[in-house]
Image (tube, helix red, strand yellow):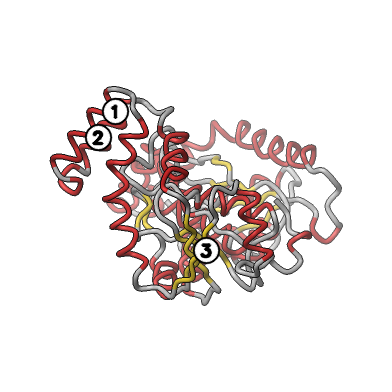
């Protein structure tokens, strides 16, 4: 477990530079190392961090129990007994992390931002302070995150409460909203990809063929990193969604602003929409498609559900999609009814051409200095 901040101050005196605030810590160069247990890391972490746990999950629980039952000294002694035999491997891992970062850097860092080991634990306590001391013995430059991951999470949630110039891209299912947003991003528009970060397309079928979803906590971390990179944009485009994308909940502060944001509705012919859906879902496992259909059976109604399941069994993907569209179209129309909406018919234009048309008509604007923005 981590020590109080007063104990961190003592550790910091040995470690070198004082702990950094969140934004300075994130902006610094060098490998980002999370010293928390694997379970803590899996629940959520700073994007780009590597997990180098000082204690595994069971050991962390043991130390926490000792701290509660026998006090700080017993917990510290047990922690030392666990870590002692690992000092060489920990030191080697720190040396390797910094060396690999220096090798991977495409250009030498400027002198004022030379790479260092960026270390943090849960609240900036004994785990990070102890490893910073070890790094100091190896003459490795170190930065500590003041307040640890707990402070980072406060920063993440506060970021979503700031005012953002959000614009929603809407359109009925199959209009290719995600592909269009990605095409707009390629042309320099500020885009926040809610579905991409969630590994989900936003419907009962949305998880098919995609990696497992992150926790809602880590989803927030990913979105915060993306949003922070878009500061200064005149408008930030994101897809019109419900409050959850699969199991990932859109951050409350962001969701409140989304509900008030103006929307641009893209329209496509029905057959174009069906073709788009067949291209995505026709490659998926029929059993998964049938299961997803059963999950919305009450909303589809018995007749549409039966027809959809028959079409899936016959690999008639177009007919299956048509059975779903009536339900999803009604849901979409209801959700968008509360927004100020401007509509544009994109016909059968491919995403790149459609993005060009929106830019040409002034419906979407390129981010200022977008050409200087990193990928």
Q: What whole-number distance in Å separates the C-alpha atoms at marks 1 and 3?
A: 32 Å
State how many labels appear: 3
Which numbered disc, 1 or 3, marks the residue closer to the eye? 3
1 and 3 marks in contact (CB < 8 Å): no
- Residue 134's x, y, as percent? 64, 45
3 and 2 marks in contact (CB < 8 Å): no
Residue marked by disc 2: 308
Q: What whole-number distance in Å separates the C-alpha atoms at marks 3 and 2?
A: 30 Å
The answer to which quarter of the image holds residue 365 is bottom right
Q: Is residue 262 above or below residue 115?
A: below
Q: Earlier in the sequence, mark 3 or mark 2?
A: 2
Residue marked by disc 1: 312
Q: What whole-number distance in Å separates the C-alpha atoms at marks 2 and 1?
A: 6 Å
Residue marked by disc 3: 344
Residue at 38% x, 35% y is: 208
- Residue 125's x, y, as percent? 50, 57
2 and 1 marks in contact (CB < 8 Å): yes
Farthest-out residue, left = 302
């Amino acid at each position: 477990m981590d020590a109080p901040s007063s104990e961190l101050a003592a550790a910091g005196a040995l470690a070198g530079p004082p702990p950094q605030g969140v934004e300075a810590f994130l902006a610094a160069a060098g490998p980002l190392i999370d010293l928390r247990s694997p379970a803590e890391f899996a629940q959520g972490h700073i994007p780009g961090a590597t997990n180098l746990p000082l204690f595994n999950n069971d050991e962390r629980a043991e130390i926490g129990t000792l701290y509660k039952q026998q006090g700080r000294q017993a917990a510290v002694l047990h922690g030392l007994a666990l870590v002692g035999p690992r000092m060489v491997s920990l030191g080697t891992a720190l040396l390797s992390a910094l060396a690999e970062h220096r090798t991977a850097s495409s250009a030498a860092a400027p002198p004022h931002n030379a790479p260092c080991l960026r270390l943090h634990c849960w609240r900036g306590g004994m785990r990070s302070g102890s490893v910073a001391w070890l790094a100091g013995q190896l003459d490795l430059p170190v930065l500590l995150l003041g307040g640890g991951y707990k402070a980072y999470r406060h920063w993440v949630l506060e970021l979503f409460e700031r005012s953002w110039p959000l614009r929603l891209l809407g359109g009925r299912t199959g209009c290719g909203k995600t592909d269009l947003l990605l095409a707009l991003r390629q042309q320099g528009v500020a885009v926040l990809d809610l579905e991409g970060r969630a590994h989900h397309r936003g419907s009962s079928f949305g998880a098919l063929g995609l990696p497992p979803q992150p926790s809602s906590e880590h989803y927030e971390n990913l979105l915060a990193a993306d949003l922070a990179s878009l500061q200064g944009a005149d408008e930030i485009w994101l897809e019109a969604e419900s409050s959850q994308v699969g199991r990932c909940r859109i951050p409350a502060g962001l969701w409140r602003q989304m509900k008030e944001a103006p929307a641009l509705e893209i329209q496509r012919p029905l057959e174009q929409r069906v073709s788009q859906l067949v291209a995505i879902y026709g490659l998926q496992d029929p059993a998964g498609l049938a299961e997803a259909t059963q999950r919305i059976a009450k909303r589809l109604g018995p007749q549409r559900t039966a027809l959809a399941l028959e079409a899936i069994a016959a690999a008639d993907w177009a007919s299956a999609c048509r059975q779903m569209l009536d339900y999803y179209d009604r849901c979409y129309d209801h959700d968008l009814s509360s927004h100020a909406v401007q509509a544009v018919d994109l016909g059968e234009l491919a995403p790149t051409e459609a993005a060009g048309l929106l830019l040409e008509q002034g419906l979407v604007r390129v981010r200022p200095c977008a050409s200087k923005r990193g990928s």
